Image (cartoon, rainbow, N blue to C red):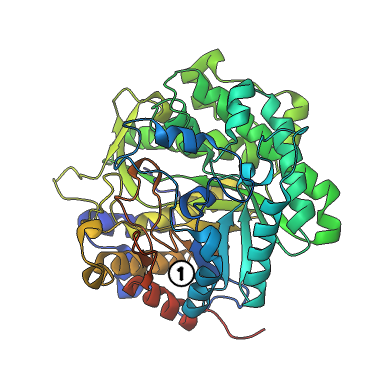
Amino acid sequence: MRVLALASLATAALAARSHPSRSSSSHPHMRAEGNNLPSDFLWGGSSAAFQIEGATKEGGRGESIWDVFAREPGRIADNSTGDPATDSYHRYKEDVQLLKSYGAKSYRFSVSWPRIIPKGGRNDAVNQEGINYYSNLVDELLKNDIVPFVTLYHWDLPQALEERYNGWLSSEIVDDFENYVRVVFQALGDRVQHWLTLNEPLTVSSNGYSLGKFAPGHKSDTEPWIVAHHFILAHARAAKVYKEEFKAKQGGSIGITLNTNWFEPYDHSEANEAAAQQARDFNLGLYADPIYLTGDYPPSMRKVLGDRLPTFTDEEKAEVLGSSEFFGLNTYTTVLTQWGGNDETSGFTQSGFTWPDGSQVGTQAESSWLQSAPWGLRSLLNYIYKRYGEKYPIYITENGFSVKGENSMPVEQAVHDDDRVDYYKGYTQAMLDAIHLDKVDVRSYFAWSNLDNFEWADGYSVRFGITYVNYQTQERTPKDSAWFLAGFFEDVISKDA
């Protein structure tokens, strides 16, 4: 969540800067002709186990670090927990039918590590009830012609591993993660073709180990970089296991999904152009450079962090570089970046939404960190494609918007989520422009999120869903944004086989 990467985008960027509240994608001359997407393009909704499943003490599930974190006073905005969330452990068939009614072609969900191996470790017992749940979910999706897109780790580390060796702070985690993913590949891989090893490792290493806002709630200037290092090694190991032991027979693909904003320079000065690039390095390059570009961290990070940034052995570099078969991307917004501040995890840059003339980047969401700026998505897609190589297709695995004040609205009002509809109109068109005008290879678009759900430290106080959830009754009601996306992708995805 700069300098524009391509000269071909300069005109679009200048237009956006001149009219900050308007998406360059809305200008008629920027629209691509022949906007059809291939028939195998995947669109759908996204979710994560802890945010929707509930049933935290059912089905043999072990405790996760988020169960413990959410119970600590003051950690969650509304003092809520992940139980019952949206009760999707019991209501998954209803959720699949919702997706089917939207015409979704795919569903991105995560497998809960403590539901599969309650104690987490390679010598700990596997929970067959947990495997059965996800196996049934996959079968239900396939029965309804919806492609399962599976995340192996979306932040819910087994609490037992946190207690046993401090979780992601220990290199022990790599071997235990290898064992866990192997169990999942064996159980589901005959029916799952799309795998993500990790979701947004940056969010965990920063919010969980530097800022203390997410589980496990640490504040440190050394731990974020240790955790990031172990994330990269665990990802690479999981990818290696899949490619060497399962890919030939199962035929799927495996990658990682990284999150970033588009960091636009606050102004045209050389200093702020450099600041924007440093922010990209610290927020995206931390993970993307080792995996897709060089096998190592960006030099700008080494310059700032020195020996606090771990080093890869030559063997590890070889295993890490090229480990992902595609580029998974979660992105929500564009920020204006300049030097300053004390946030080391962003390379001592600071970002905001106010242009030098006092105008805003876009429409403000309920979430303070989010404004709508579709032109930034096009810039980001071009940056990734050109920097990290055209051999890596991009899968947009999360994109979405929290409507201001929505949580206090009655359902009859909340379902008319005009700001979210406008957001999706702009961002889907920006994606089409990147595909058709700039020839960027984008192969999926997943809305965050399919349902309103437990939004981590915000609890249930912020809603991102294209489906409204009444948390007292668990009734689901489609919002206008769901029908916009349904109609949009019905129109642009080719019907040809």
Instruction: Name above or below for residue 169 compared with residue 190.
Output: above
Residue 90 position, x and y percent, is 54, 62
Quadrant of the drawing holding the N terminus: top left
**x%, y% of residue 46?**
50, 59
Q: Residue most toward the bottom? A: 496
Can you see residue 463?
yes
Inspect the image, locate mark 1, and give the three-letter code of the amino acid beneath it. Answer: Leu
Residue that label 1 marks? 432
| Front residue (pair 449, 11) | 449
Q: Confirm whether residue 442 shows in the render.
A: no
Count of numbered tags: 1
Q: Position of residue 177 (x, y in %)?
A: 70, 37
Q: Callout 1: 10 Å neighbours few (<14), some, many (20+)?
A: many
In the image, what residue occupies the spot 85% across and 57% down? Answer: 248
Determine whether the residue tagged by mark 1 lies in a helix, strand or loop: helix
In which image quadrant can residue 121 be found? top right
Task: Locate residue 218 relative to residue 180 in the image: left or right.
Answer: left
Residue 226 placement (x, y as % from top left):
57, 23
* Point 57% across, 32% down: residue: 159
Above or below: residue 8 compared with residue 337: below
* Closer to us: 139 or 191: 139
Residue sitting at x 67%, y 65% = 136
Q: Residue furthest left?
A: 358
Viewer-proximal residue, 210 or 34? Answer: 210
Looking at the rendered image, the quarter that the C terminus falls into is: bottom right
